[in-house]
Image (cartoon, helix red, strand yellow):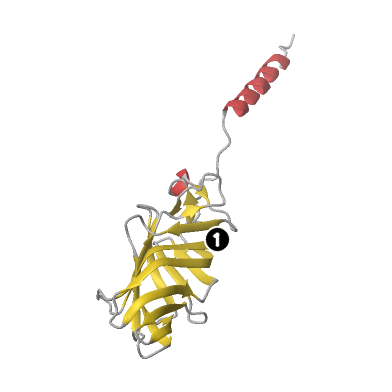
Amino acid sequence: MRASLTVPLVAAAVLSAVLVAVVPAVADETPAVLTTGAAGTDGANVAAGDVVNASLVTGTTAFFANSESGTTGVTCTASSFTATVTGNPVAPGTATESTTDQQFSGCTANITGVTGVNGVTVNSTPMATTVDSTGAVTVGSADAPVQTTIALSTLLGSINCVYAATNGSISGVASNTGNSITFTSQPFTKSSGSILCPASGFFNASYGPVLDTTVEGSPAVFTN
């Protein structure tokens, strides 16, 4: 009499079902250039359309110097930027953003003949922005240069000094330490304004932490 195969087959099917139940689904372990919460596979990929922003690193200022290593210029105690992520490919690669707003306030000047700062306005928003896996950040382009107006009160009245990024764009460095972006001595050239306006400016600022405000809890953004 032949042995029945029914019991072994049923047992195998049950064992297979149990294994499927206890083995968790494998998550997507391919990180994008930008992740939140942590770097690499421990983080969650930032979705296109997410809004990120940051203010100045605590205890720092934004400084528009009149020379590359000078101490004369315009200092702002508060600044922030807001950007929308437009593309976030698998790392290594380059994420794209549109910087839609950049604000400055609490500004003063130590320029001869200048008695106050009436405002600092970024005229070129939205600005094309890229973040590379290496940490290289670029804001603006040759076709759409970064442009800023600094309104000053002087002994001769109010003046507007308009500056454009010398190379069309400015470059920064993103760091996962503090989730920051730092701009150092980025050159601007006066495009219009009074003779009292400095001929050039060099932008210095550190923003962080950069936060994804679209995600609940606004987690920090990491570069991969």
Q: Nearer the viewer, residue 87 or 63?
A: 63
> Taking 185 as reference, is 31 above or below it?
above
User: Where residue 109 appears, x then y in whole percent?
Assistant: 32, 74
> On the rendered structure, is 85 left or right of 116?
right
Residue designated by label 1? 85
Crowd tier of the residue under label 1, counting other residues whose Cα lies within 10 Å: few below 14, some 14–19, many 20 or above: many
Work out whether 104 lies above or below 66: above
Q: Farthest top residue? A: 1
Residue closest to the eye, 208 or 49: 208
Element under disc 1:
strand
The vertical placement of 11 against 191, above or below, is above
Q: Which residue shows up at 53% across the image and 72% down it?
A: 125
Q: Is residue 57 above or below residue 44?
A: below
Count the marks. Answer: 1
Residue occupying the point 66% across, 20% down: 14
State which quarter of the image contains the N terminus: top right
Asked whether residue 94 is in view, the answer is no
Screen quadrant of the C terminus = bottom left
Does residue 178 appear in this view? yes
Viewer-side residue, 6 vs 126: 126
How far across and down, in percent of the image, does residue 127 sit?
52, 72
Q: Residue at x 36, y 91 (%)?
A: 195
Residue 123: image location, x then y, percent: 51, 76
Q: Quadrant of residue 77?
A: bottom left
Find residue 135 and report its image quarter.
bottom left
In the orientation shown, which residue stands out farthest toward the right? 1
Answer with the quarter of the image where residue 187 lies. bottom left
Q: Nearer the viewer, residue 214 or 104?
A: 104
**Residue 79 image position (x, y, % from top left):** 42, 63
Amino acid type at image mark 1: Val
